[in-house]
């Protein structure tokens, strides 16, 4: 069905299966439903993207992240009140349809014996307000059964028209990853039904178009692919360019932002577009993030933002890092509950162009918090964000990253504060100024003076006002990296043999240090550490020899309570940094932190008013066109001299 329709029904979800890394990701697509630990090759095998063989006397279930139908979300955000399941079989067996409740309890709602036929079920999309899914199980009899294809379809009103999207990928020197994304988009026939254009915004020095396999990947897309060269303006600059390009196309109802270093499940792109097509209002449709290095683990399927401290948290009863290989969908009750979301990461996020036209493009902040701020801004205009189950990409995980140990800490802190100023609407920012001050103290206790310096520079830039943000896009990263280089904790040494041996030289201060286990112990130890670092001179030997080795996963403030220097391994394992206590730097940094965070608290309302008044201007299409140096007449990628025509 190349047009995606059956009579007046429109296919919105295809049941799909992995053809690569099957064993590693199988739990995301199928569940044997037997509890006996059966794996691919024991209960079934994958034939192609739409087909599987179920072996004799075996049972498999589509109660899985990618193949269960998220009925609750369809009831919440669309007018659809019935869904049709169509399943085509070769062979004989039994197909049973199940529904779940928000409590995770499931029950069979229909079943049918089949024999070389297409079986159809019309199911109500009701009673799912609090949560729940539909899925189906297949039981084979005496012989192997072939599932040829399966689709979930919904009725379309007369005059309904399908939407298409500009898919925008921003890349910086990740050519092999980006090339894989281009292939994924170009070679999947279902994506072709919902694709207007693929716009690759290349901001790097190693160009994706120079890859040997680029011509063959580009050929699958033809004139629907545009590669745009521009300076490195960060994620917000790259994705805003993709947004602008979508506005220049009359055929794009949506822009779908996609990270270059992600691996897509191509069906997710199709589902996001179709869900948005049936939305009751223009809706931002986000996808979850699966870990690229642990493929069955879902980092998040919905996040919320706290206005009291301008920080994020998992939605509702959900938690970060759920492993479907350990806890399948059928067995984890909390996964069946409906989860609202305040925002969705731009590893994959579909935005209606109507929303972009009304509220503007991304905040010009280079990277970090641009995705959060955009969804919060959209919500204030009446446009929700939905993190839709069954829509996701695999992305590089956060667990081997520590932004306080990189130049990114500047952007995280600055943009967090700006987002709070724009959207917290809590008196004096709630807990944010205090939280920021305590965060500085924690970093000072860990001898991460460079991170504290970047956080202070971030606040100074906040105080300078919003109109300097666009002009800083192309330059601020280099300036911040140079500033950080002045601090010893910023330098990672990969030659471990050249470092002096570990030798303890500092004296114990007010007794032995133990890990605090309650709030009183934590406060007591913190006071001891503060007094020691402010008043006790660092030992001379700590400058000659590190006193301890602290692995990156174990870094925490109390491990530095009784020493003056340490070798701390880099989060990526490529070397170590030699942290060294400096009493003078500690004193200066603490005083500066008190002064800046007090100013943030005192001036919050005035700053919030200033940023709020400027938001429409600095996120406008006009402002971004000035950043890109592109006029209204030549904004389209087809006319841009920096655009590669394929």
Image: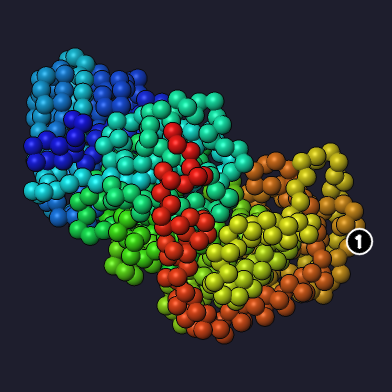
- Quarter of the image with the C terminus is top left
Q: Is residue 590 above or below residue 542?
A: below
Could you say which quadrant of the image residue 391 lies in? top left
Tell me the SS state at disc 1. loop
Q: Position of residue 427 (x, y in %)?
A: 46, 82
Q: What residue is shown at x 77% (from left), y 74% (from top)?
A: 588
Q: What residue is shown at x 37% (from left), y 35% (from top)?
A: 223
Asked whether, in this view, residue 189 is left or right of residue 641, the answer is: left
Asked whether, in this view, residue 16 is left or right of residue 348, the answer is: left
| Rendered image coloring scheme | rainbow
Q: Is residue 328 above or below residue 431?
A: above
Q: What residue is shown at x 28% (from left), y 67% (from top)?
A: 382
Name the one closer to the observer, 136 or 285. Answer: 285
Asked whether, in this view, residue 271 is left or right of residue 616, the answer is: left
Q: Is residue 398 above or below residue 374?
A: above
Name the one closer to the observer, 565 or 458. Answer: 458
Q: Position of residue 514 (x, y in %)?
A: 69, 61
Q: Is residue 303 above or below residue 99?
A: below
- Mark 1 burial class by Cα count in 10 Å: few <14, some 14-19, many 20+: few
All told, the count of numbered labels is 1
Could you say which quadrant of the image residue 89 lies in? top left
Q: What residue is shown at x 27% (from left), y 23% (from top)?
A: 52
From where the camera sits, is residue 457 visible?
Answer: yes
Residue extending furthest toward the top: 143
Name the one closer to the observer, 246 or 484. Answer: 246
Residue extending furthest toward the front: 633
- Quarter of the image with the N terminus is top left
Q: Position of residue 261 (x, y in %)?
A: 50, 41
From where the camera sits, is residue 101 visible?
Answer: no
Could you say which quadrant of the image residue 303 lies in? bottom left
Q: Position of residue 305 (x, y in %)?
A: 42, 65
Residue, disc 1: 540
């Amino acid at each position: 069905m190349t047009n995606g329709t059956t009579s007046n029904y429109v296919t919105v979800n295809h049941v799909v299966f992995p053809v690569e890394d099957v064993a590693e990701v199988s739990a995301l697509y199928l569940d044997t439903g037997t509890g006996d630990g059966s794996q691919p090759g024991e209960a079934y095998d994958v034939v192609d993207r739409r087909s599987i063989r179920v072996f004799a006397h075996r049972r498999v279930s589509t109660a899985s992240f990618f193949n269960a139908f998220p009925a609750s979300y369809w009831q919440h955000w669309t007018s659809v009140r019935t869904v049709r399941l169509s399943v085509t079989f070769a062979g004989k067996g039994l197909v049973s349809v199940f529904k779940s409740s928000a409590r995770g309890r499931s029950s069979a709602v229909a079943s049918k014996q089949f024999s070389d036929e297409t079986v159809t079920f019309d199911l109500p999309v009701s009673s799912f307000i609090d949560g729940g899914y539909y899925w189906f199980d297949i039981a084979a009899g005496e012989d192997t059964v072939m599932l040829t294809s399966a689709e979930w379809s919904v009725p379309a009103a007369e005059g309904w028209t399908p939407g298409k999207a500009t898919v925008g990928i921003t890349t910086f020197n990740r050519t092999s990853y980006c090339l894989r994304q281009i292939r994924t988009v170009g070679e999947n026939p279902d994506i072709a039904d919902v694709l207007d254009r693929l716009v690759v915004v290349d901001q790097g020095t190693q160009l994706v178009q120079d890859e040997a396999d680029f011509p063959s990947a580009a050929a699958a897309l033809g004139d629907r692919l545009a590669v745009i060269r521009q300076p490195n303006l960060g994620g917000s600059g790259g994705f805003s360019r993709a947004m602008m390009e979508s506005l220049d196309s009359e055929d794009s109802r949506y822009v779908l932002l996609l990270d270059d270093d992600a691996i897509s499940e191509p069906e997710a792109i199709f589902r996001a577009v179709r869900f948005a097509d049936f939305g009751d209002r223009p809706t931002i449709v986000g996808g979850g993030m699966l870990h690229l290095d642990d493929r069955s683990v879902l980092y998040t399927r919905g996040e919320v933002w706290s206005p009291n401290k301008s920080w994020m948290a998992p939605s509702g009863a959900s938690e970060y890092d759920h492993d479907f290989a350990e806890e399948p969908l059928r067995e984890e009750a909390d996964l069946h509950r409906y989860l609202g979301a305040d925002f969705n990461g731009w590893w994959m996020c579909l935005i209606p162009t109507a929303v972009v036209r009304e509220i503007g493009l991304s905040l010009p902040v280079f990277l970090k918090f641009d995705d959060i701020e955009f969804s919060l801004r959209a919500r204030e205009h009446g446009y929700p964000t939905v993190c839709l189950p069954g829509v996701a990409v695999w992305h590089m995980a956060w667990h081997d990253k520590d932004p306080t140990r990189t130049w990114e800490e500047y952007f995280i802190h600055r943009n967090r504060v700006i987002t709070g100023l724009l959207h917290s609407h809590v008196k004096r920012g709630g807990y944010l100024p205090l939280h920021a001050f305590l965060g500085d103290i924690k970093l000072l206790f860990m001898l991460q003076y460079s991170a504290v310096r970047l956080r202070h520079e971030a606040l100074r830039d906040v105080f300078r006002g919003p109109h300097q943000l666009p002009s800083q896009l192309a330059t601020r990263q280099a300036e911040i990296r140079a500033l950080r280089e002045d601090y010893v904790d910023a330098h990672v040494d990969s030659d471990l043999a050249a470092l002096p041996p570990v030798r303890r030289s500092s004296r114990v201060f007010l007794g032995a240090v133990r890990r605090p286990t309650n709030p009183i112990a934590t406060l007591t130890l913190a006071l001891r550490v503060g007094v020691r670092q402010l008043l006790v001179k660092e030992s001379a030997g700590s400058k000659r020899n590190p006193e301890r080795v602290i692995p990156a996963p174990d870094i925490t403030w109390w491990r530095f309570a009784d020493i003056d220097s340490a070798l701390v391994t880099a989060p990526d394992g490529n070397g170590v940094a030699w942290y060294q206590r400096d009493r003078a730097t500690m004193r200066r940094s603490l005083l500066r932190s008190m002064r800046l965070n007090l100013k943030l608290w005192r001036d919050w309302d005035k700053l919030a008013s200033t940023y709020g008044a400027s938001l429409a201007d600095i996120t406008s299409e006009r402002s971004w066109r000035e950043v890109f140096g592109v006029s209204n007449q030549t904004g389209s990628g087809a006319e841009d001299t920096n655009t590669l025509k394929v």
